[in-house]
Amino acid sequence: MTDLPQQFASDNYSGICPEAWAAMADANRGSAPAYGDDGWTTRAADAFRSLFETDCEVFFAFNGTAANALALASLCQSYHSVICASSAHVETDECGAPEFFSNGSKLLIAETTDGKLNPQTLRALALSRSDIHFPKPRAVTITQSTETGQVYSVEEVKAISAVCRELGLRLHMDGARFANAVASLGCKPADITWKAGVDVLCFGGTKNGMAVGEAILFFDRALAQDFDYRCKQAGQLASKMRFLTAPWVGMLENGAWLNNAAHGNAAAQRLASQIADIPGVELMFPVQANGVFLSASDEILGKLRERGWRFYTFIGGSARFMFAWDADLSRVDALAADLRELAG
Ligand SMILES: *Cc1c(COP(=O)(O)O)cnc(C)c1O
């Protein structure tokens, strides 16, 4: 039973994709050792190593807030700080979890209008103070793809990591929508992560088609020391771990992760192209991943809501539409048609 016609308020409105579901059903045959000592978990970690072409350390958490917060905590002491863009999920949507799990590492906010951190602002903020009274910059986090539906190119990530290396900062990537970025760039996962200077990646499974779960990949293995204890203490060690990891096997071993993301991206492109010529409806950001941000009058947006469409306006007042693996293209067309009619 579904309770609403399909909505695009968020990509986590979607269900579980068939590949993840089938792997969970497989994992449900019989019993297996608990807390990650099972075959599925080993296979999932190996699938990540082979996908990223490197011998990284891999951990699994229930959600992105925990993955980000624990990853950042592992990079910092309590007196350190973490530089992020003003629109970063870690700043705006994690209820202080990064500060909490790091015992106080402060987030330093770089104001950006387009949702991206850039090397100049990063450098200026990192060098703004060096005295004992200010929390010492130690890490940088960027979101790929961004909260505004954009993608950092390989060159952009490299430019940021170059500043990080120069200033002794570690680079974390919030990849709640990492798959959408890879699908958009057409690059290899390695190119946009460790080969471009990323130390730690949180790879989102939930928005990519799983029921629940994110993977944390440490490309610098030394940074992963005792991370298993951190996960356990934070209540993030799943006792029936195989149900968190089997879906990854189902999605990574046959490319479903990338196909799912490509479908979401294509749905976003489809909406963007259909509304491009509607007067009074403007795209707020370039559409590079699976999200479309529209500015339109309160009247148009109100009427859109009256017609039953759900969407958020928490980013700069623009209406956000997010597309997942299951986006029904006829619903995308219906949304575009409603916008055209209401704006006309
Ligand atoms: C969804 C999301 C997360 C993870 O959120 P949870 O609800 O904690 O799983 C992290 N970062 C970004 C950018 C997100 O969009």
Image: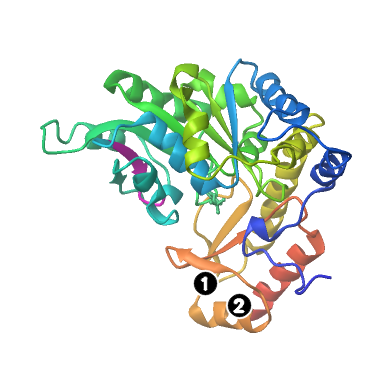
Q: Secondary structure at mark 1?
A: loop
The number of numbered badges drawn on the structure is 2
Split into 4 quadrants, where in the image is the N terminus? Answer: bottom right
296, above or below 160, in the image: below
Query: Which residue is rendered at x = 46% and y = 65% of the image?
Result: 314
Q: Which mark is residue 339?
A: none
Residue designated by label 2: 343
Query: Which residue is rendered at x = 57% and y = 47% of the image?
Result: 63
Split into 4 quadrants, where in the image is the C terminus? Answer: bottom right
Amino acid type, callout 2 = Ala
Cα separation, mark 1 vs mark 2, equals: 9 Å
Q: Which stretch is magenta?
A: 81-87
Query: Which dot, 1 or 2, sits closer to the camera?
Result: 1
Q: Where is residue 135 drawn, in percent x and y?
A: 20, 37
Look at the numbered discs 1 and 2 and tell me whether their residues touch, using CB distance below 8 Å.
Answer: yes
219, above or below 61, in the image: above
